[in-house]
Image (cartoon, rainbow, N blue to C red):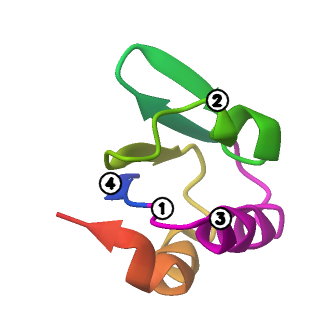
Amino acid sequence: MTVNIHLKEINDVYKLVNILVGFEGDVDLESGRYKVDGKSILGIFSLDLRQPIKLTYESEVGADKLLEKLGDLIVD
Protein backbone atom coordinates (compact mmCIF):
# COMPACT_ATOMS: atom_id res chain seq x y z
CA MET A 1 0.00 0.00 0.00
CA THR A 2 1.33 3.43 -0.91
CA VAL A 3 -0.08 6.85 0.05
CA ASN A 4 1.22 10.41 0.15
CA ILE A 5 1.30 12.15 3.51
CA HIS A 6 2.16 15.68 4.60
CA LEU A 7 3.74 16.36 7.98
CA LYS A 8 3.00 20.03 8.66
CA GLU A 9 4.47 20.31 12.16
CA ILE A 10 6.68 18.44 14.62
CA ASN A 11 3.68 16.94 16.41
CA ASP A 12 2.65 15.30 13.12
CA VAL A 13 6.00 13.47 13.04
CA TYR A 14 5.53 12.17 16.59
CA LYS A 15 1.94 11.21 15.81
CA LEU A 16 3.05 9.31 12.70
CA VAL A 17 5.77 7.35 14.51
CA ASN A 18 3.40 6.48 17.37
CA ILE A 19 0.89 5.13 14.86
CA LEU A 20 3.46 3.18 12.82
CA VAL A 21 5.14 1.40 15.76
CA GLY A 22 1.80 -0.26 16.46
CA PHE A 23 1.91 -2.09 13.11
CA GLU A 24 3.98 -5.18 12.31
CA GLY A 25 4.89 -4.52 8.68
CA ASP A 26 7.78 -2.48 7.31
CA VAL A 27 7.09 1.16 6.55
CA ASP A 28 9.27 3.24 4.25
CA LEU A 29 9.08 6.98 3.68
CA GLU A 30 10.43 8.53 0.49
CA SER A 31 11.16 12.14 -0.32
CA GLY A 32 12.96 12.74 -3.59
CA ARG A 33 15.74 10.17 -3.81
CA TYR A 34 15.90 9.57 -0.05
CA LYS A 35 14.23 6.58 1.60
CA VAL A 36 14.06 6.04 5.38
CA ASP A 37 12.41 3.73 7.91
CA GLY A 38 9.04 5.22 8.80
CA LYS A 39 9.42 4.14 12.42
CA SER A 40 12.59 6.21 12.89
CA ILE A 41 12.10 9.76 14.16
CA LEU A 42 15.65 10.71 13.19
CA GLY A 43 15.16 9.26 9.73
CA ILE A 44 11.99 11.26 9.21
CA PHE A 45 13.65 14.50 10.29
CA SER A 46 16.34 13.93 7.65
CA LEU A 47 13.69 14.28 4.92
CA ASP A 48 12.39 17.49 3.36
CA LEU A 49 9.16 17.85 5.34
CA ARG A 50 7.97 20.88 3.36
CA GLN A 51 6.78 18.55 0.59
CA PRO A 52 4.41 15.56 0.68
CA ILE A 53 6.17 12.27 1.46
CA LYS A 54 5.43 8.86 -0.05
CA LEU A 55 4.59 6.25 2.62
CA THR A 56 4.83 2.58 1.65
CA TYR A 57 3.46 -0.10 4.00
CA GLU A 58 4.78 -3.61 3.24
CA SER A 59 2.09 -5.81 4.80
CA GLU A 60 -1.41 -6.80 3.82
CA VAL A 61 -2.44 -7.24 7.45
CA GLY A 62 -3.79 -4.04 8.98
CA ALA A 63 -3.52 -1.84 5.89
CA ASP A 64 -7.12 -0.63 6.21
CA LYS A 65 -6.68 0.16 9.89
CA LEU A 66 -3.45 2.05 9.15
CA LEU A 67 -5.21 4.15 6.50
CA GLU A 68 -7.92 4.97 9.03
CA LYS A 69 -5.40 6.09 11.66
CA LEU A 70 -3.40 8.19 9.18
CA GLY A 71 -6.59 9.95 8.04
CA ASP A 72 -5.74 13.65 8.38
CA LEU A 73 -2.08 13.21 7.32
CA ILE A 74 -2.96 11.74 3.90
CA VAL A 75 -2.91 14.07 0.89
CA ASP A 76 -3.68 13.47 -2.80
Picture quadrant where residue 35 is located: top right
Looking at the picture, tell me which residue is in the foreground, 62 or 56.
56
Give the mark nearest the N terminus, 4 or 3: 4
Residue occupying image coordinates x 54% and y 32%: 47
Q: Tell me the residue that label 2 is attached to.
A: 46
The image position of residue 6, as x and y in percent, is 39, 60
Q: Amino acid at mark 1?
A: Leu
Please state which amino acid type lies under the numbered disc 3: Ile
The local crowd at label 2, few if under 14, some if 14 to 19, many if 20 or more residues have their Cα within 10 Å, is: few
Query: Where are the magenta residues, as a range?
Result: 7-26
Q: Nearer the viewer, mark 4 or mark 3?
A: 3
Q: Point out residue 65 in the picture as x, y percentages from the top left corner.
A: 56, 82
Mark 1 surroundings within 10 Å by alpha-carbon count, few (fewer than 14), some (14 through 19), many (20 or more): many
Q: Secondary structure at mark 2?
A: loop
Give the residue drawn at x 64%, y 28%. Answer: 36
CA separation, marks 2 and 1?
13 Å
Q: Which residue is mark 1?
A: 7
Of tags 4 and 2, the one toward the viewer is 2
Is residue 21 rendered magenta in the image?
yes
The picture places residue 70, in percent across and down from the top left corner, at 50, 76
Label 1, secondary structure: give it: loop
Residue topped by disc 3:
10
Q: Which residue is mark 4?
A: 4
Work out whether residue 27 or residue 48 is closer to the camera in this orientation and state it.
Answer: 48
- Residue closest to the eye, 68 or 50: 50
